[in-house]
Amino acid sequence: MFYAAGMRTPSLPIAALAAVLAAALPGTAAAQTVVPGEVVVRYAEGVDQAERADVQRETGVGDPEAFAPHARRLQITDGESIAATVRELRDRPEVVSAAPNPIASIAAINPRDPGDSGVRGGWRDLQWNFLPDIGISAPDAWQHVLDAGARGGRGTTVAVLDTGVAYSGRGRFKRSPDFSRGDFTRGYDFVADDRRPNDENGHGTHVAGTIGEKTDNDVAVTGIAYGAKIMPVRVLDRRGDGDSVEIAQGIRYAARHHADVINLSFEFHFSISAGDIPEILAALRYAHRKGALVVAASGNDREFGDVAVAYPARAPNVVAVGGTTERRCLAEYSNEGHALDVVAPGGGEDADLADDPNCRPGVKGRPIVQMTFARSVRRFKLPRDYVGTSMATPHVSATAALVIASGVLGDDPSPHAIEQRLEATAQDLGPPGVDVRYGAGLVDAAKATDPAVPRATSSSG
C-alpha cells in the first residue's frame, strides 16, 4: 500500500493489522516486530502546530519527534493499543498516514561462536565469492576498471546503513585493521543520535569489508570496490535491530549527503507490509530522486515456506538481492518471489531444489569471510560463520560502485541504468530467463564493467 503527498493511505485492514501487532506482544516469539507504544504519523501539508496538537490530544498520543517533513514519531499516552490508536489517527482528516513503528533486523545467519580465524592460502582460498564461475568474477572487473584509468571503486561513495562500522579508533573503539581513516566519509549514528556511528555488533563492519576493504596491503582479505568511500550510518543497535524511523532517517541522510549507492543488509519481519512502513517508502523515493541506487537483502525466511521478498528490498526502485552458495545454488535461507532482482554469494547450505542440478542439500557450504571483530570491539579476526542475504547484498552494492567507477555507463549513470546493467549482465541460473528463485541471475562484476558488453538501449528511468 503506497501513498503520495496529499493523498490518504489506504488503511491496512484492522484484522491484518491486529495480526501483525499481536505478534509483537511481549512474551511471544516475535516480540521485536514493532516498537511498543509507538506510532508514526505523517500530517497533510498545511497542518499547523496547533492542529497537530489537537490531533495528538484527541487521539491520546504525545511527545512528538519530527524526523522528516510533516512526519512525527509519537508515543501512545492514553493506554490504548497500537491498532486502536492507528485507526483513530487514520480517521483524522489532518493525517495522511499512520502506522506502527516496525523493527528491522540484520539479514544474516550469524551464530555466536566466532569460529577459526586462521588464514591459510590468502584471499583466493577464503573468498570463493570473488572468483569466476562460483562467485562474481571480481579480478576481471578490477582489471576493467584499471583499464579505464580508475582503481577499484575510487570516486564513488557507498553508504552502509547497518550496526555501524569500525571506522575510527576513539575511546574503547578501534578501527578495523584492513581500513584506513581515508576510506571513510562522515556518517551519523541515528540510534545514539550523534556523529560517531561506531559498530557494536560486528555485522556492519563485515558488510563494509565486502564492499571496500583494502587490497594488496598484506593484511587480511580484500573488498570488491576497494578505494570507494564508505559512509557509515548506524540505524541498527548492538543486537542488530532498528526501527522504521531510524532507518528512514538514515536513508534520507545518505541520499542528502550524496551517496552513490545505499546498502541495506537487513529485513523486516515477513508480516510487515508496505502500509506499515510509509516513511521508509517515502525515504526510498527521496533517495531515488537524489540519484542513489538502493540495494537491499531479500531476507532469510525461506524456511517458513512460501515467503515473499521482505521489505525494504520489496519496495519499488530497490535492487532486491538473494543469496547463493559456492555451488551456484540458491541458499537454503534465501527468500524467493517476483520482486527478486538478482542474487549474489551469501554462503551456507544449498536449498533443496530437485530440479536444479547445482544443488546438494544438506552439504555444508563455505561462509562469506571478511574482517570484523568478535566479542570485543577491539579484537579483529576473520570469522567463518557469516552467511545470509546480508552478506550477498554488499556484493551487489560494490559491483554497482565498480560500474560507476568504470565509466561504462557514462559519467553520472542513473540508478535505473545501473540496475539495468547489473541485471542484463548477470549469469542466468535456474530456469532460462528471469525467475522467482534467482531473479535475473548471479551478479557478474566482470561483465558489468566490461566496455565490450553493449549498453542497454532502454531510456526509461
Image: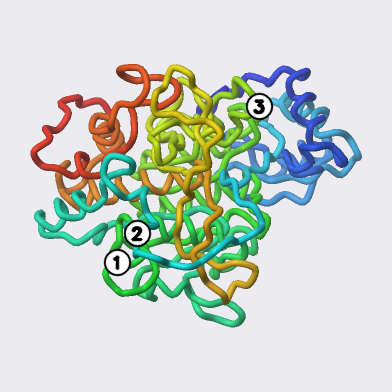
Residue at which label 1 appears? 215
Q: Amino acid at mark 1?
A: Thr
Query: Residue 447's x, y, as percent?
Result: 19, 39
Query: Residue 161's x, y, as percent?
Result: 50, 53
Which color scheme does this rendered protein use?
rainbow
Q: Which mark is residue 82?
A: none
Query: Residue 191's x, y, as percent?
Result: 63, 59
Picture quarter with the N terminus: top right
* Residue 68 shows in the view: no
How far apart are the alpha carbons under marks 2 and 1?
Answer: 7 Å
Mark 3 is surrounded, within 10 Å at the Cα level, by few (under 14), some (14 to 19) or many (20 or more) other residues, namely: few
Residue beneath the point at 39% across and 69% down: 220
Q: Secondary structure at mark 1?
A: loop
Based on the displayed image, in which of its 4 quarters is residue 8 positioned?
Answer: top right
Residue beneath the point at 68% across and 25% down: 93
Query: Residue 312's x, y, as percent?
Result: 53, 36
Q: Amino acid at mark 2?
A: Gly
Residue farthest along the right direction in this orientation: 79
How far apart are the alpha carbons under marks 3 and 1?
Answer: 39 Å
Picture quarter with the C terminus: top left
Residue at which label 3 appears? 304
How far apart are the alpha carbons under marks 3 and 2?
Answer: 33 Å
Mark 1 is surrounded, within 10 Å at the Cα level, by few (under 14), some (14 to 19) or many (20 or more) other residues, namely: some
Residue at which label 2 appears? 223
Which of 432 and 120 lies nearest the eye of the viewer? 120
Which of 397 and 78 lies nearest the eye of the viewer? 397
Q: Secondary structure at mark 3?
A: helix
